[in-house]
Amino acid sequence: MMDLIYLLEDDDSIRKLVIYALNSQGYEAKGFERPAEFWKAMGQAQPDLVLLDIMLPEEDGLTILQKLRAAAGTKKLPVIMLTAKNTEYDRVVGLDSGADDFISKPFGMMELVARVRAVLRRTESREENSDYQLGELFVSPKRHVVKVDGEEVSLTNKEFELLCLLLEHQGMAMTRDAIMDGVWGQEFSRENRTLDVHVRTLRTKLGSAGHYIETVRGVGYKMGGEGA
């Protein structure tokens, strides 16, 4: 069964080009010019991934993303943001709001298809993972549940992805670039402090289990291992 992809983009030429490119690569892609059309389609059939422009009529893409993340049925729906904006601030806001990736215009169609494929692959891989238990820390990737000493912990999507990635490679030191690629995608700048901020916040939220995330100087981070 082919993956269903929704594109919300008010530029007619870009919308037609993207839909053509995705359909030619074996996806079932549907395009929408306005948020009202998108929401109507969402009520009829939920896609496997959403491509979402930021600058839109009626309501902007970040508002739509926040609504998707706030609803239980679409909380984990993969979303890639498309935008002409290219500042680090816009990227941080989009990704911290729960976007799975961020592509700046103009972009090549094959690059777009590759990024769509990568996000879908990451999502499917995450859903196949079994539960993790590390000391007092319990994580269920499939159910999107994190507990410390039996108490549920609320994490943002990116914090949750970061935690699952480190647990998936438990005991291994992961480089900063590998973590950034796995959680934020290859286009995101390696020079900013996004990763360090997320690790610090994640440690705080995990409380007594926060020490399991270890800093490996000159390399990156690792989860668990000896002495965990």
Image: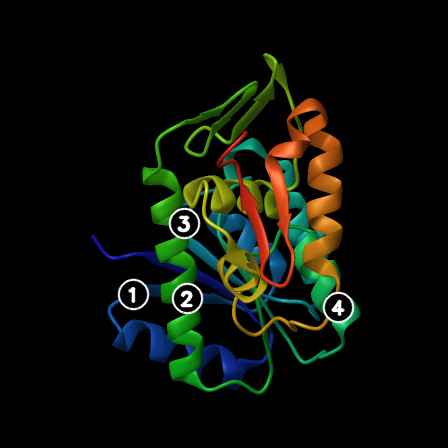
Q: Mark 2 or mark 1: which comes first in sequence?
A: 1
Q: Is residue 42 above or below residue 227?
A: below
Outermost residue to the top: 150
Q: CA distance from mark 4 to mark 3?
A: 23 Å
Residue 121: image location, x then y, percent: 35, 56
Q: Which residue is mark 3?
A: 123
Q: How many other residues sit within 10 Å of disc 1, few (<14), some (14-19) or many (≥20)?
A: some
Q: Mark 4 or mark 3: which comes first in sequence?
A: 4
Q: Which residue is mark 4?
A: 90
Residue 138: image location, x then y, percent: 51, 23
Q: Label 1 amino acid? A: Tyr
Image-based side of 224 in relation to 83, left or right: left
Q: CA distance from mark 2 to mark 3?
A: 11 Å
Q: CA distance from mark 1 to mark 3?
A: 16 Å
In the rendered image, is residue 32 in sight? yes
Outermost residue to the front: 227
Q: Which residue is mark 1?
A: 27
Q: CA distance from mark 4 to mark 2?
A: 20 Å
The residue lying toward the viewer, choosing from 185 and 48, is: 185
Disc 2 secondary structure class: helix
Q: How many other residues sit within 10 Å of disc 2, few (<14), some (14-19) or many (≥20)?
A: many
Q: CA distance from mark 2 to mark 1?
A: 10 Å
Residue 116: mark: 2
